[in-house]
Image (cartoon, grey):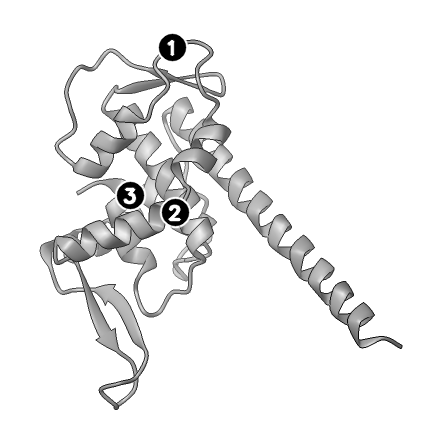
Amino acid sequence: MTTAKDLFIIAMDPDHSVGQGDLSLALAGAELIDLVGAEAVVVDGDHIVPGGSAATPEDRLMRAAVEGLIPREPYERIEDWLWRRGRDLSATYRAALEEDGVLTRKRTGRLSFGAERVEPADTPARTRAAKRWAEKEPVLAALTSVLGVEDARSDDEPGFDDEAVTTVMAAVHDAVMELEAVRQRRNIENAAFANVWRGP
């Protein structure tokens, strides 16, 4: 399992409500942090430089992430990677985890034709993700915090020993904030349009 998959499992818990756009950006950040840890990439300032590791990731989603890297100068900025790689990434993870049996579909309410939702199945993957989150593993804790999934037991901000991880996490935070600003602006514009349409 990867940080991105653990993050997705935590975000899909029925007790949490996470926007798919926010989650997609955070998943792209989680992938990048794992790639840094595997030495598949190096963070140079705010750019992503493919690293010296020739090992191919076993995880198919991580392989897709590696294959999507820009291998030559000018290397891609972290912010641009988050938006490009993050496009519809939550849907990609949902499909992959459903295929692997990590997610299951359930109907809400008592009727068999109620609304359908997806939630983590009782699997070793769910247990591992929950254990990592309960132990406040810094990267996973920071990513869930960015998504608004807070652990009520602690108000401490996790710290990182790796400057590259700190840089990526800051970029994820900024991207999620930018997405929220776009949403708010759109809501204001839609409300203004509705007021004009209704007239005085």
Q: Which mark is residue 11?
A: none
Residue 4 circle label: 3
Residue type marked 2 = Asp
Q: Quadrant of the N terminus?
A: top left
Residue position for label 2: 88
Identify which amino acid the numbered label 3 is placed on.
Answer: Ala
Q: CA distance from mark 1 to mark 2?
A: 25 Å
Instruction: State the separation of the CA atoms marked 2 and 3.
Output: 14 Å
Which is more foreground, mark 1 or mark 3?
Answer: 1
Front: mark 2 or 3 = 2
Tell me if 41 is positioned left or right of 102 in this view: right
Residue holding disc 1: 72
The numbered mark, 1 or 2, whose residue comes first in the sequence reads 1
Amino acid type of the residue that numbered disc 1 sits on in the rendered structure: Arg
Q: Is residue 97 visible?
A: yes
Question: Looking at the image, is mark 2 or mark 3 earlier in the sequence?
Answer: 3
- Residue 135 in sight from this viewpoint: no
Residue at point 25%, 90% (across, down): 111
